[in-house]
Amino acid sequence: MKEDIRQCSTVAQPHNKIGGSHTTIIGGRHGKKLVRLISLHTEVKKIVPSVITVRGKSNPGGLIIGKVLRPDDRGNLRLLISHGTSSQELRIITTVGDLQGGERIMNELNQMIEEHTN
């Protein structure tokens, strides 16, 4: 019973969905808002930040772009965030277990991002 309550509270609180070996997200507040927006989707189970890549030297800052990329065979996705010359890939673990479900969630998440940025 106690475990059921803990799982329900994790689903209800999007900030608990972010995990992994580090929680650094590029783009400052705007990057974190983008990840928080993705975590609001009911079928997103966990978001795991990955390596930050920097291409060349330039002034920090610039436009923040987020795009959810194609799913794997289990329906898990990747979120690519670009901020100036930096980029970061985040793994999105979903509750669906197949490619078709992952494609559906990918389209829904990209639509959420598009509506939020316009």
Image (cartoon, rainbow, N blue to C red):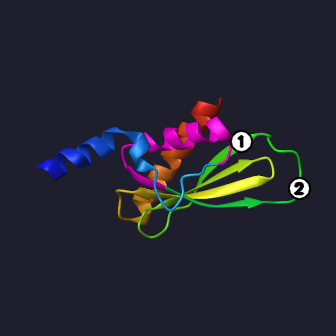
Work out which residue is located at the far bottom of the displayed protein and give it: 73
Of pointers 2 and 1, the one earlier in the residue sequence? 2
- Residue 110 screen position, x and y as percent: 56, 45
- Residue 56 screen position, x and y as percent: 87, 59
Residue marked by disc 2: 57
In the figure, is residue 14 to the left or right of 26?
left
Segment colored magenta: 26-47
Write the residue at 58% across / 41% down.
32
Q: Against 2, is 30 above or below?
A: above
Q: For residue 64, which numbered disc appears in the image?
A: 1
Write the residue at 43% across / 39% down.
40
Task: Report helix, strand or loop for mark 1.
Answer: strand
- Residue 34 screen position, x and y as percent: 58, 40
Amino acid at pointer 2: Lys
Closer to the camera in the image, 56 or 75: 56
Write the residue at 79% across / 41% down.
61
In the figure, is residue 28 to the left or right of 39?
right
Write the residue at 46% across / 62% down.
76
Amino acid at pointer 1: Ile
Work out which residue is located at the far top of the displayed protein and give it: 118
Q: Against 74, is 31 above or below?
A: above
Closer to the camera in the image, 44 or 114: 44
- Residue 73 screen position, x and y as percent: 45, 70
User: Which image quarter is the C terminus in?
Assistant: top right
